[in-house]
Image: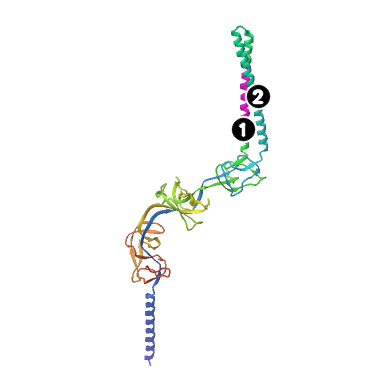
Amino acid sequence: MHKKPYKILISIAAALAVGVALFAWFGRTKPVEVTVKSIAYGKVQNTVSNTRAGTIKACRRAGISPSVGGQIAGLPVKEGDTVKPGQLLMELWNHDQLAQLALATSEADAAAANATQACIRADVAQRESNRLNQLKRKNLASDEAVDKADGEARAQQAACNAARATRKVSEAKIRLVESELERTRLTAPFAGIVAEVNGEIGEFVTPSPVGIPTPPAVDLVDISCLYVSAPIDEVDAPQIRVGMPANISLDAMAKKIFAGKVRRIAPYVLEMEKQARTVDVEVDFLCPEACDGMLPGYSADIEVIIQENDYALRVPTEAVLEGNKVLLYTADDTLRQREIKTGLSNWAWTEVTDGLAEGDEVVVSVDRDGVEDGAAAVRDKSNAPPG
């Protein structure tokens, strides 16, 4: 009567034991899929990168406006136009200055004519004085006539000098009017591209009051020379020197890396609220042709190369775990943790000075579940075995 329940309990316990054993067996033997990379020799760089996105800037950029207020009468350029040095960009109404210039020019012409007339008379009077002096030496002319001729010559010469001075005053007045007229004309200080025009024909523009910035009438950019300005953390900045090589990358051209060189390191630290303190570093593009298609304002990142080894045994940086350890993929399809010694390092590669040999395979998919020391593993489908 009592044996049957015992047999049932024994059967249930046996079934549970078998289930646990099978679960443990299949759980223990199921390998984890991993991505591995072979250790090889290559270039490794120790770099310093910007903390926030940098910006491509033009070597020359000017927001320019007329120095006087007035009504826009001429606007011969539009946004996107390429201009030459001295080319007219904007002209204010200036008919009054043009009239003053015409008047000053006429006055200068009249003053020049008067000066010519006065100086001719002075020459005639001087020749007459010289002639009478010669006659006097021969006792053929009186002292009175000679004195009168000398006085007339000096008077006419003084009139000549005065007329010449008046002509110079008139010429100076022309230059004054021309300078006033020039203030109504906005011209390009250098060759470039018109990035922005603020104003239309018929509108009024006024000079920016002192201490109150206003939008420029014309924003002119010289895109023939571009550079990158990017903030570097204050901790990394002391390692950087002018002339160091650098790599430049752009979001707009994600597949390209451009060579550059540090051109300037700001001599001060920027302190911005809720952000790390940084130092602005400027990097030139080494090849001007590399700037084709780039525009000022593009976001850019820089990597300043502090040290470089062209032939180093290297491992992908993503494979290096805390404490300078890696997971080695062994010939028996098992993961083995190994400690290594490292040298130069950046976000892509880390130099291995001890602990690995060329051809060793390490796991780079270290964040997957089950990837740990001693785990059975198999390469995932994207990872073909070497050879």
Does residue 91 show up?
Answer: yes
Q: Say which amino acid is labelled 2.
A: Asn
332 drawn magenta: no
Q: Which residue lies furthest to the top in this view?
A: 139
Residue numbers of the magenta segment: 155-177
Q: Is mark 1 on a helix, strand or loop?
A: helix
Structure colour scheme: rainbow
Alpha-carbon neighbours of circle 1 within 10 Å: few (<14), some, or many (≥20)?
A: some
Residue that numbered label 1 is attached to: 176
Numbered mark located on residue 79 in the image: none
Check the image and report above or below for 175 versus 291.
above
Picture quarter containing residue 370? bottom left
**Secondary structure beneath label 2:** helix
Within 10 angstroms of label 2, few (less than 14), some, or many (20 or more) residues?
Answer: some
Q: Is residue 272 visible?
A: no
- Residue 264, horizontal then vertical, whole percent: 45, 46
Give the residue displayed 38% in from the left and 57% down from the top.
Answer: 43
Write down the residue under mark 2: 114
The residue drawn where x is 61% and y is 16% is 127
Place of residue 227 in the rendered image (x, y in percent of width and height, measured from the top left): 48, 49
Q: Where residue 355 sits: x, y (%)?
A: 32, 62
Left or right of 209? Residue 26 is left
Q: Main secondary structure of the magenta part?
A: helix
Query: Residue 229 at x, y = what percent?
Result: 48, 50
Q: Quadrant of the N terminus?
A: bottom left
* Quarter that holds the C terminus: bottom left
- 1 vs 2, front mark: 2
Asked where in the image residue 13 lies, by quadrant, the reply is: bottom left
Q: Is residue 111 positioned above or below 140 on the image?
A: below
Amino acid type, label 1: Leu
**Looking at the image, is mark 1 or mark 2 earlier in the sequence?**
2
